[in-house]
Image (spheres, helix red, strand yellow):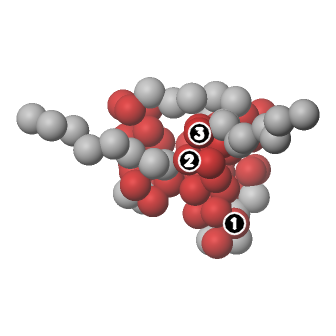
């Protein structure tokens, strides 16, 4: 049986969980900061919900963080 690799988004979104826990925030606290439900935030952290780039920017602004601190981001070529 082949080993199951973690989803790319799961690895990327684990940054959000790490950021949250390093600051001693619970999902309830993060929900209060962002106006999002705990269920939604949990899905984001587990990689079950993929946020589009603009939503990542909005999310980071809501919590006063840089996008790259919360999520993996790809560079944009102008």
* Direction front: furthest residue: 1
Mark linked to residue 21: 1
Circle 3 or circle 1, nearest the eye = 3
Instruction: Give above or below for 24 relative to 69.
Output: below
* Left or right of residue 7: residue 78: left
Where does the image place residue 49, in percent across and percent down from the top left? Answer: 64, 28
SS for callout 2: helix
Mark linked to residue 12: 2
Circle 1 or circle 2, nearest the eye = 2
Where does the image place residue 78, in percent across and percent down from the top left? Answer: 9, 35
Q: CA distance from mark 2 to mark 3?
A: 6 Å
* Left or right of residue 73: residue 27: right
- The residue singled out by tag 3 in the image is 8
SS for callout 1: helix
Label 2 near label 1: C-beta < 8 Å?
no
Q: Residue at x 65, y 42 (%)?
A: 10
Front in this rendered view, residue 22 or 9: 9
Label 3 near label 2: C-beta < 8 Å?
yes
Where does the image place residue 22, in percent across and percent down from the top left? Answer: 64, 72
| Residue 43 seen in this snapshot | yes
Badge 3 density bin: few <14, some 14–19, many ≥20, Cα 10 Å: few
Q: Residue at x 59, y 63 (%)?
A: 19
Q: CA distance from mark 3 to mark 1?
A: 21 Å
Q: CA distance from mark 1 to mark 2?
A: 15 Å
Mark linked to residue 59: none
Circle 2 or circle 3, nearest the eye = 3
Q: Residue at x 15, y 37 (%)?
A: 77
* Direction right: furthest residue: 1
Label 1 near label 3: C-beta < 8 Å?
no
Instruction: Give above or below for 68 relative to 19.
Output: above
Badge 1 density bin: few <14, some 14–19, many ≥20, Cα 10 Å: few
Mark earlier in primary sequence (1, 2): 2
């Amino acid at each position: 049986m082949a080993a199951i690799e973690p989803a790319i988004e799961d690895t990327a979104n684990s940054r959000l969980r790490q950021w949250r826990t390093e600051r001693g925030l619970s999902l309830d606290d993060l929900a209060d900061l962002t106006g999002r439900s705990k269920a939604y935030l949990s899905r984001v952290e587990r990689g079950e919900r993929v946020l589009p780039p603009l939503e990542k920017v909005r999310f980071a602004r809501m919590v006063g963080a840089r996008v790259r601190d919360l999520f993996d981001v790809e560079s944009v070529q102008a």
